[in-house]
Amino acid sequence: MNTKAWIVVGVLTLFSSAGHAQSKHFNADGYILSQATEDAAAAAGDPDAMWEQSARWGESPSDAVVAELSRAGMTGLDTGGALAAWRKEYGQGLREPTPATAALLRQRAAKDPPGLLAIQFEALALTGQWEPPYDGGTPVPNLLVLAKRGEPAAIAFLCRTAGLPFILMRNHAPFCAKGVALGQPESAYHLARLHHGRADDFHDGFIDKIDEALHIKPSLPRALALYRQAAQGGHAGAQARLATLLAAGRGVKPDPVQARELAERSAGAGWPEGQAVLGILLLKGQGGPADIGRALMLLDQAARSGQRMAQFTLATLAFRGQYRPRDFLDALTWVRLAQLSRRGDPPEAEADALLLEPLRRTRHVARTIGNPVLDLDARIKAATLRKELHESGEWQLEKPVW
């Protein structure tokens, strides 16, 4: 073997051993295993690391950590006593909280969309009545009564919330059919999502509601018919979803031209999934001429709104150095943001048919770079960007995963 070959082997061996040493800090899913590395991330100001640290090691966050989380808009600890206070007041016979408790409840609801309290405040705007503290079943019994009387707004509300993890589907889902019968595009869209039954359409995954799945029979043909009905009624979400299915050829014959038309309408209404699908179609020149500049602009808009497919697309492009300079930090940042984003966008199987490179490979390669410093930098950059977007109103933060 010549000298040049030995140099190459030596470099590869060094890179491999370094990567192995660094990757011991992470598991196969890219989560930190080392307490020292988690401490470093928390000390650097990564709010998610702060939460993970306190949860994993059984310690209450320090005042400094709580303050940092509050600045990042990612904590309800300062209003943690609000629910207990409201429950106590309700037990004492009050049917609406005291002004002080109500103010704390509103603060907490604003920090946790689309959580249980946020749902109750939406119901309050419709019924004019405070809902009792949640104790199982439905968090909006007063609104349920209104829906049973045939109030269209209440019916649409119950259908829209049927797939949330803290909702018993059997209490809410039946109102979707009533909404469809009333000609409500929103109800048709949400009933379509329930028939579609994809895990990525639900915040905690449809698998967590498997015991209730029989209340809505999985049927892609039925879902497609409802998506079409809602899209014809002008629902931007249905237009985006139908565009995704038509572009990927999922359950229908691929039709990039119609997909692009629907995506244009959805993106024009500001729907993030529509922006993402249109961006990808423009990027690939499907359904019409390619427009790289506009495609990247749309993908960036959707990604900054928390749309996971757009975030993974930008990660793919940054990792490959396509249309933009290669940037591993940018790629890892978007991967991290996508992991923390809410669900509600096309799953991997459908997105793979649209992207230039499968998302699975992008995530796998990004995770196995095995560089804790690069990963930590990406976590901090992602946390900072989320904070900026939250403060600007572009992307309401979800609670971090811990």
Image: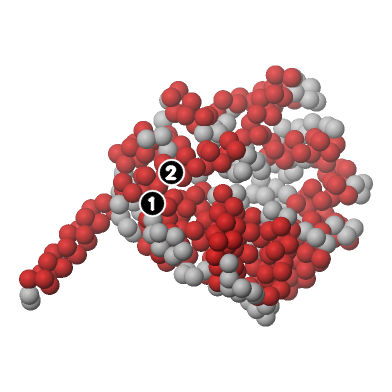
Viewer-nearest residue: 38 or 283: 283
Above or below 332: residue 220: below
Determine which of the numbered discs, if any, sits on residue 126 in the image. none
**Where does the image place residue 242, in percent across and percent down from the top left?**
70, 68
- How far apart are the alpha carbons under marks 2 and 1? 9 Å
Spot occupied by residue 49 in the image (x, y as percentages of width and height): 42, 39
Do the residues bearing badges 2 and 1 touch, measured as CB atoms within 8 Å? yes
Please report the residue visible at 79 percent of the width from the left and 49 percent of the height from the top.
158
Answer above or below: position of 129 versus 243: above
Instruction: Report which residue position mark 1 lands on.
Output: 329
For label 2, the residue is: 381
* Residue 122 position (above or below residue 300): above
Seen in the image, is 336 located left or right of residue 370?
Answer: right
Query: Label 1 amino acid?
Result: Leu
Where disc 2 sits, the SS reads helix
Q: Nearer the viewer, residue 237 or 224?
A: 237
Category of crowding for the residue at label 2, using alpha-carbon neighbours closer than 10 angstroms: few (below 14), some (14–19), many (at least 20): many
Q: Is residue 169 left or right of residue 389?
A: right
**Circle 1: element type:** helix
Q: Choose top left, top right, bottom left or bottom right for residue 197.
A: bottom right
For the N terminus, the quadrant is bottom left
